[in-house]
Amino acid sequence: MGILTILFNRQILQYLGTDALSVYGIIINISTFVQCCAYSIGQASQPIISTNYGAQKGKRIAQILKYALGTAVVFGVIWTAFA
């Protein structure tokens, strides 16, 4: 990934200049943070869902899924409004 990033940055610098590279850097950092927020929902809900699946608690799984999807929607609305 590091080599690919270096090559990509060199191409932006060559064809678009330093201003475009600085804007790209900011956008990529924000994008990475937003992705981490989205991934955290799945990472947090996975052990809870798997425990309840093993205990055969289908209603709890549905409730957790509802909370996870609701949280994803809230994050999506917030980040879309921010953008």
Image: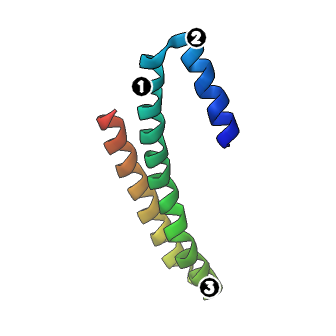
SS label for mark 1? helix
Between 65 and 41, the residue placed more toward the observer is 41
Q: Where's the C terminus, which quadrant?
A: top left
Q: How is the image coloured?
A: rainbow
Say which label, 3 or 2, has the lower sequence index: 2
Q: What numbered label is drawn on residue 15? A: 2
Q: What numbered label is drawn on residue 23? A: 1
Tell me where residue 22 sits by quadrant: top left
Question: Disc 3 designates what residue?
Answer: 56
User: Are circles 1 and 3 on residues that touch, CB within 8 Å?
Assistant: no
**Left or right: where 15 falls relative to 22:** right
Say which label, 2 or 1, has the lower sequence index: 2
Q: Is residue 18 above or below residue 62?
A: above
Say which label, 1 or 3, has the lower sequence index: 1
Residue 3 position in % (x across, y down): 69, 38
* C-alpha gap between disc 3 and disc 2: 57 Å
Residue 40 position in % (x across, y down): 48, 61
User: Are circles 2 and 1 on residues that touch, CB within 8 Å?
Assistant: no
* C-alpha gap between disc 2 and disc 1: 14 Å
Tell me where residue 67 sits by quadrant: bottom left
Q: Is residue 9 above or below residue 75?
A: above
Q: Residue furthest bottom?
A: 55
Dot 2 alpha-carbon crowd within 10 angstroms: few under 14, some 14 to 19, many 20 or more: few
Question: Label 2 is placed on what type of residue?
Answer: Tyr
Question: Label 1 is placed on what type of residue?
Answer: Val
